């Protein structure tokens, strides 16, 4: 399985201590070096910067594609990079949370999963305790509706 990840899902899974779910669910995960730069940015939490500096062996870091399709020009550069990678690698899943990126990827036929979707699958496989994870997620600035979190709790 080929999974490509954007910055936001990595960031929040690291912050809530659930980044280990990615290799359990997807095996290897591919990110563009542009995503590494975002994870290392000055404004990123130190926990996130420390994690990427000691990147695990299940994370493959590849060069950011140079040829970005015109259909992606309305997106942020990191989102452009991960969707271009997903197209190039014929990814099985694109791990992304931003709405415009998700919609664009889906229009291009790329399956998407976000943090809540990953946590939902992990809960169904009994890899996490949903109430504890939802509590940790609510302590971050992750933007998600309470209704969506309640669905995760309800299983």
Image (cartoon, helix red, strand yellow):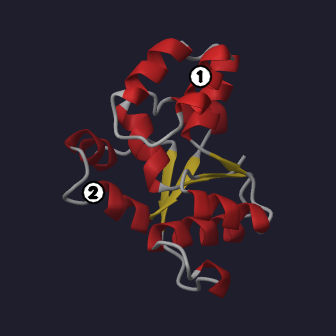
The numbered mark at residue 40 is 2
Residue plotted at (59% across, 57% down): 99
Distance from disc 1 to disc 2, alpha carbons, whole Å, reads: 32 Å
The numbered mark at residue 150 is 1
Q: How many marks?
A: 2
Crowd rating for badge 1 (residues with CA inside 10 Å; few <14, some 14–19, many 20+): few
Q: Nearer the viewer, mark 1 or mark 2?
A: 1
Can residue 17 be seen at all in this image of the molecule?
Answer: no
Element at label 2: helix
Residue 110, position as x, y percentages in the image: 75, 60
The numbered mark at residue 62 is none
Residue 79, position as x, y percentages in the image: 52, 66
Residue 91, position as x, y percentages in the image: 71, 57
**Looking at the rendering, which quadrant does residue 18 occupy?**
top left
Q: Quadrant of the C terminus?
A: top right
Residue 133, position as x, y percentages in the image: 47, 21
Query: Is 27 left or right of 61, judged from the image as shown?
Result: right
Query: Is 87 left or right of 49, judged from the image as shown?
Result: right
Residue plotted at (68% across, 67% down): 104
Residue 116 to residue 50: above or below: above
Can residue 77 be seen at all in this image of the molecule?
Answer: yes
Residue 153 to residue 145: above or below: above
Among numbered discs 1 and 2, the one appearing first in the sequence: 2
Q: Viewer-proximal residue, 148 or 71?
A: 148
Q: Viewer-proximal residue, 112 or 63?
A: 112
Element at label 1: helix
Residue plotted at (75% across, 53% down): 111
Looking at this view, name the residue that lies furthest to the right.
109
Crowd rating for badge 2 (residues with CA inside 10 Å; few <14, some 14–19, many 20+): some
Residue plotted at (49% across, 45% down): 9
């Amino acid at each position: 399985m080929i999974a490509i990840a954007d910055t936001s899902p990595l960031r929040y899974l690291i912050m809530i201590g659930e980044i280990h779910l990615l290799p359990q669910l997807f095996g290897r995960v591919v990110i563009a070096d542009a995503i590494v730069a975002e994870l290392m940015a000055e404004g990123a939490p130190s926990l996130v910067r420390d994690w990427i500096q000691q990147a695990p062996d299940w994370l493959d870091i590849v060069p950011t594609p140079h040829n970005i399709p015109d259909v992606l020009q309305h997106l942020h550069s990191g989102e452009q990079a991960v969707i271009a990678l997903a197209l190039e690698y014929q990814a099985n899943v694109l791990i992304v949370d931003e709405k415009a990126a998700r919609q664009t990827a889906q229009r291009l036929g790329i399956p998407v999963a976000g943090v809540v979707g990953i946590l939902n699958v992990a809960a169904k496989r009994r890899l996490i305790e949903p109430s504890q994870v939802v509590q940790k997620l609510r302590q971050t600035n992750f933007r998600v509706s309470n209704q969506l979190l309640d669905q995760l709790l309800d299983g």
